[in-house]
Image (cartoon, rainbow, N blue to C red):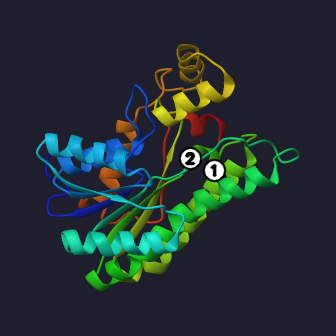
Amino acid sequence: MAGRLEGKVAVVVGAGQTPGDTIGNGRATAVLFAREGAKVFAVDCDLGAAQETVAQIEAEGGIACAHRADATLEADCRAMVDACEKHFGRIDVLHNNVGIGGGDAGPASVSVEAWERIIDVNLKSVALPCKAVLPVMRRQGGGVITNISSIAAICSTNIIAYKTSKAGVNAYTQSLALGNARHGIRANVIMPGLMDTPMAIEGISKARGIEKGALRAQRDAQVPLGAKMGSAWDIAHAALFLASDEARFITGVALPVDGGQSARVG
């Protein structure tokens, strides 16, 4: 099945990626949306990274535009929405893929700095783009919003700020869905499990001083389905389904894409 987003305009926030030897969730989603007919407004705080995503889309014959914005700043999010409307005329899909970790710890030892930084980025980068796009989608009579969370939101973990922030994304998305259903706007959240993406592998390898091959082996062993991590394409395909008309009666859902991890430990 092709053209599942034909004629749609999709804003992908966090469409660039951390340098690495695999593709990241945001870039994979932007590329797949374009392959399925969407015009993609690729947003990242690193304009160069967004432009690389656009170049990949255009090389495949797709249509895309790069835009720089910090998703934790309300003015940037308003400007992002205005720029997309000016360039493409409408917004049908908003996909929020920004998130951070690092420096986290358990409840008794997490620093105030880490707590504030992680909570601030991971919640604002969802809430502010949504706030900016809602008037447009309401005016148009509908739209789709997909937020990226994590199975950390529902599974036991000792990284308390990250877990709390992702649980907040889930709760926010549920309220967003219920509060905007009458406007024809659907909102869902995807909860990735252990993924083989640059942000995960490069970041954790560097932070823990672990060789990437060994880290991948450790993470693979934790996944029930095939003893192998997922890829960014697994997240992208879930996002494509939720953004498409095939999911027209689905809203307020938190979808694990995790190879069974949450079924085992959630």
Marks 1 and 2 sit apart, C-alpha to C-alpha, by 6 Å
Residue 5 image position (x, y, % from top left):
20, 57
Relative to 135, 86 lies left or right: left
Q: Residue 153 carries which label?
A: 1
Q: Is mark 1 on a helix, strand or loop?
A: helix
Amino acid carrying mark 2 in the image: Ser
Amino acid carrying mark 1 in the image: Ala
Q: Do the residues labelled 1 and 2 touch (CB within 8 Å)?
A: yes
Vertical comparison of 63 with 198: above or below = below
Relative to 175, 21 lies left or right: left
Viewer-proximal residue among 199 and 73: 73
Residue 184's image quarter? bottom left
Relative to 257, 223 lies left or right: right
Extreme-left residue of the structure: 61
Q: Which residue is drawn at 25% across and 45% down?
A: 32
Q: Which residue is drawn at 43% across and 66% down?
A: 187
Extreme-bottom residue of the structure: 139
Q: Which residue is drawn at 49% across and 62% down?
A: 71
Residue 50 image position (x, y, % from top left):
34, 49
Residue 237 image position (x, y, % from top left):
32, 44
Residue 241 image position (x, y, % from top left):
31, 52
Relative to 125, 206 lies left or right: right
Kindly identify which residue carries mark 2: 150
Instruction: Report whether residue 91 is seen.
Output: no
Q: Which residue is drawn at 58% across and 47% down?
A: 100
Q: What element carries label 2?
A: loop
Q: Residue 115 carries which label?
A: none
Residue 115's image quarter? bottom right
